[in-house]
Image: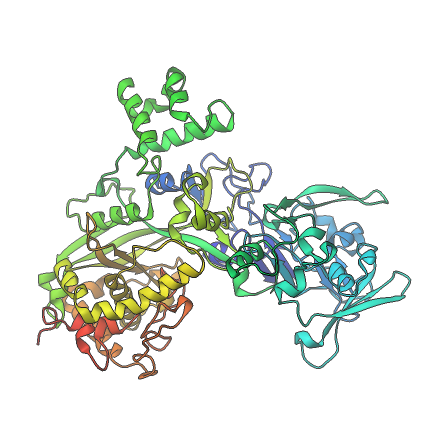
């Protein structure tokens, strides 16, 4: 039995590390590179040679330091490749008796395993059917609703056995095989009515404990007086990462064996974790290592880190180093370092010393030896390019330059076709603000799965291109929260999906933006958001973000307004359209001021057509005017437009709510942060704050 999911769900909803709920069972999605005999796992179970799910883009492969990307296997896979899972949580409850059972115990008795004849391996569950209750014939067990997770990515079952006995000062009963029952004492499912009861195997009652406070992290898992009651001390500072699979073989007393999750050490665990007089910051750092109770389907149990990039023709930008050279060099370096032939400390010197042995790898490039040696030296010497890897700013700048480059001529296999229209061709009230419009008839987007975080989302997006040796302080702690989707550090692929569609790119007038940003009333309104953002980052000891600007907030908000209007005009749902905001600081060496709106879904709704047509001079002007006019009044006004404090996550939104600006999170590139209609159309008191109502812009 199999369960089918959409390709996009394999990254956003059911990516590696996610808990997936299906009829009869709950499973953990395993790493994409878990072996799937006979082809291994590097290409998600497909054969390496001519893998049908291979996605190539040299520019992005260099940025992520991989060989290529792989899309999820499809049902028609010749290799029978699939997305692998293992059952999680491993504690199940009988809906009739309320008794709790451990999956590993049931596995050791094959008669309780539904369709157990079909099971081929113990590290992966492929039957996709629930267990029968050992106590009640014909009833299936259900997964418990509670799990525990840490900010550092660890995930485990809720420790019912430890909890009920520690709360009753009976630690000697832990691990004695007592029968546990999760019962509700009322007519509701609230925590106050839930109790865990413990009975000896012979039926003798031992103790019970209420689950009322299990969501209080300090009360449940931390103890400053007794190390036996401190959970990290009880588990010796080790917790599992279930998405890496069951790799540790254990044997039961009667001879049966089973595989369990490997438990990884948690760094810097000590007792007591902090003193009574510890500062809030010190407590916060320590508590980040401790687990907290979460509902199995809670939204904060899984935050996928997905980078959306546009695949552009090679001739559309000018890389610092030839990308074909960098791609081959990275593969050579990975292979030699994995084989322990060269060191990570002095790779350049090692490579040059053995140049005669590796130069054949570059034969396809037809470069002279001296030129190759020079490129190798340049690759390792350029600190600003992160040893050949691009930063987010560099990737976005390359895309921006490509869009406005009239000389781009893509090759036949490159999915790209553009038409540049000068802003003078557009005649509407705010047309002076438009510098260029680029109609992208063919556009290829790659959604690259870099990993995920738990409990809270990643705070610094640029960390996805960093290495641990290049970051310090809070950025390093944040980097360590990123959970890599690969189970093998030598895997040179990352999961990704490909979307081919169309888009509209709009470049804005830089001079008008600069004059508008210098207005005192604009600066004052922007400072509200900026101060809230700074305070949040200061509270968590983060470095200041220099990339936030008033123009970014205005362009980002306008992008949301335009997507809402385009979804009405061209028939796409707003969730089928996505945005990328190309914007940097006014003082940057190369100024970017643009937005890209494009189709972002791979199903039938993403191929309706008609988006590019709405970018023509006869159509786009009226669409923009309609979007601006509708944004002048929100159904939540005046409460929405009068906000001068800040709302939403981190308080970085002002005049923005679900009635006017917010989009589905798959459409917004900034998780619906940094939005303010006031910077687009002004406020009730001062319309001159709005970018679209400057004298240089608004003409009648």
Report the residue that reaches farthest toward the front. 277
Rendered image quadrant of residue 328? top left
- The residue that appears at 16% across and 60% down in the rendered structure is 514
Q: What's the residue at 74%, 49% (across, down)?
A: 117
**Looking at the rendering, in which quadrant would you find the N terminus?**
bottom right
Give the camera-side residue of 31 and 126. 31
Q: Position of residue 160 (x, y in %)?
A: 73, 61
Q: Position of residue 694 (x, y in %)?
A: 13, 71
The residue at the point 29 percent across, 42 percent down is 413
**Is residue 326 depicted above or below 589 in this figure?**
above
> How many badges with numbers are in the image?
0
Q: Nearer the viewer, residue 83 or 520?
A: 520
Quadrant position of the C terminus in the picture? bottom left
Left or right side of 319 for 695:
left
From this viewpoint, which residue is outermost toward the top?
Answer: 356
Answer yes or no: is residue 325 visible: no
The image position of residue 637, as x and y in percent, is 31, 83
At which x and y percent is residue 450?
Answer: 45, 48
Q: Is residue 338 above or below residue 53?
A: above
* 278 lies left or right of 179: left
Q: Is residue 45 visible?
A: yes
Residue at 60 percent of width and 57 percent of height: 149
Res 195 quadrant in image: bottom right
């Amino acid at each position: 039995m199999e369960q089918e999911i959409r390709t996009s769900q394999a990254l956003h909803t059911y990516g590696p590390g996610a808990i997936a709920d299906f009829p009869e069972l709950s499973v953990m999605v395993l790493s994409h590179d878990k072996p799937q005999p006979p082809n291994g796992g590097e290409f998600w179970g497909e054969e390496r040679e001519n893998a049908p799910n291979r996605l190539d883009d040299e520019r992005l492969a260099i940025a992520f330091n991989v060989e290529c990307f792989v899309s999820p296997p499809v049902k028609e896979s010749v290799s029978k490749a699939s997305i692998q899972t293992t059952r999680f949580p491993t504690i199940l409850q009988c809906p009739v008796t309320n008794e709790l059972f451990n999956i590993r115990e049931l596995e050791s008795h094959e008669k309780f395993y539904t369709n157990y004849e079909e099971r081929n391996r113990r590290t992966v569950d492929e039957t996709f059917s629930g267990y029968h209750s050992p106590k009640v014939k014909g009833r299936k067990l259900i997964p418990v609703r509670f799990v525990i997770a840490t900010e550092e990515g660890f995930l485990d079952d809720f420790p019912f056995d430890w909890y009920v006995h520690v709360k009753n000062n009976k630690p000697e009963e832990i691990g004695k095989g007592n029968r546990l029952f999760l019962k509700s004492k009322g007519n509701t499912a609230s925590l106050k009515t839930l109790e865990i009861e413990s009975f000896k195997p012979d039926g003798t009652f031992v103790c019970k404990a209420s689950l009322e406070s299990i969501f209080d992290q300090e009360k449940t898992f931390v103890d400053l007086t007794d190390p036996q009651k401190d959970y990290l001390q009880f588990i010796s500072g080790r917790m599992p990462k279930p998405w890496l699979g069951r790799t540790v073989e254990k044997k039961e007393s009667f001879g049966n064996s089973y595989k369990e999750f490997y438990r990884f050490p948690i760094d810097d665990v000590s007792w007591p974790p902090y003193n009574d007089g510890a500062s809030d910051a010190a407590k916060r750092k320590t508590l980040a290592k401790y687990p907290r109770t979460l509902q199995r389907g809670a939204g904060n149990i899984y935050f996928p880190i997905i980078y959306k990039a546009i695949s552009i023709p090679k001739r559309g930008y000018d890389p610092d180093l030839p990308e074909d050279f960098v791609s081959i060099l990275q593969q050579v370096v990975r292979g030699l370092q994995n084989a322990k032939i060269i060191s990570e400390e002095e790779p350049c010197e090692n490579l040059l010393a053995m140049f005669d042995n590796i130069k054949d790898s570059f034969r396809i490039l037809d470069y002279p030896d001296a030129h190759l040696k020079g490129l190798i030296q340049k690759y390792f010497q350029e600190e600003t390019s992160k040893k050949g890897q691009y930063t987010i700013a560099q990737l976005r700048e390359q895309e921006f330059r490509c869009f406005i480059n009239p000389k781009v001529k893509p090759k036949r296999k490159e999915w790209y076709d553009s038409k540049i229209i000068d802003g003078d061709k557009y005649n509407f009230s705010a047309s002076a603000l438009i510098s260029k419009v680029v109609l992208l008839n063919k556009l290829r987007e790659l959604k690259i799965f870099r990993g995920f975080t738990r409990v809270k989302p990643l705070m610094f997006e640029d960390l996805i291109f960093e290495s641990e040796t290049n970051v310090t302080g809070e950025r390093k702690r944040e980097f360590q929260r990123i959970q890599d989707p690969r189970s093998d550090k030598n895997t040179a692929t990352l999961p990704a999906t490909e979307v081919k569609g169309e888009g509209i790119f709009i470049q804005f007038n830089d001079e008008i933006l600069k004059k508008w940003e210098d207005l005192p009333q604009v600066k004052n309104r922007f400072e509200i958001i900026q101060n809230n953002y700074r305070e949040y980052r200061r509270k968590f000891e983060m470095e200041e973000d220099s990339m936030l600007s008033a123009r970014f907030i205005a362009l980002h908000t306008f992008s949301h307004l335009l997507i809402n209007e385009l979804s009405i005009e061209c028939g796409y749902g707003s969730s089928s359209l996505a945005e990328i905001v190309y914007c940097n600081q006014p003082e940057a060496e190369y100024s970017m001021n643009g937005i890209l709106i494009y189709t972002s879904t791979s199903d039938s709704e993403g191929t309706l057509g008609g988006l590019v047509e709405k970018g023509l001079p006869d159509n786009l002007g009226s669409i923009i005017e309609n979007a601006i006019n509708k944004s002048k009044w929100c159904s939540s006004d005046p409460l929405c437009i009068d906000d001068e404090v800040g709302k939403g996550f981190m308080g970085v939104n002002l005049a923005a709510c679900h009635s006017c600006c917010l989009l589905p999170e798959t459409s917004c590139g900034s998780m619906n942060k940094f939005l303010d209609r006031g910077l687009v159309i002004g406020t009730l008191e001062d319309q001159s704050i709005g970018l679209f109502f400057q004298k240089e812009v608004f003409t009648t």
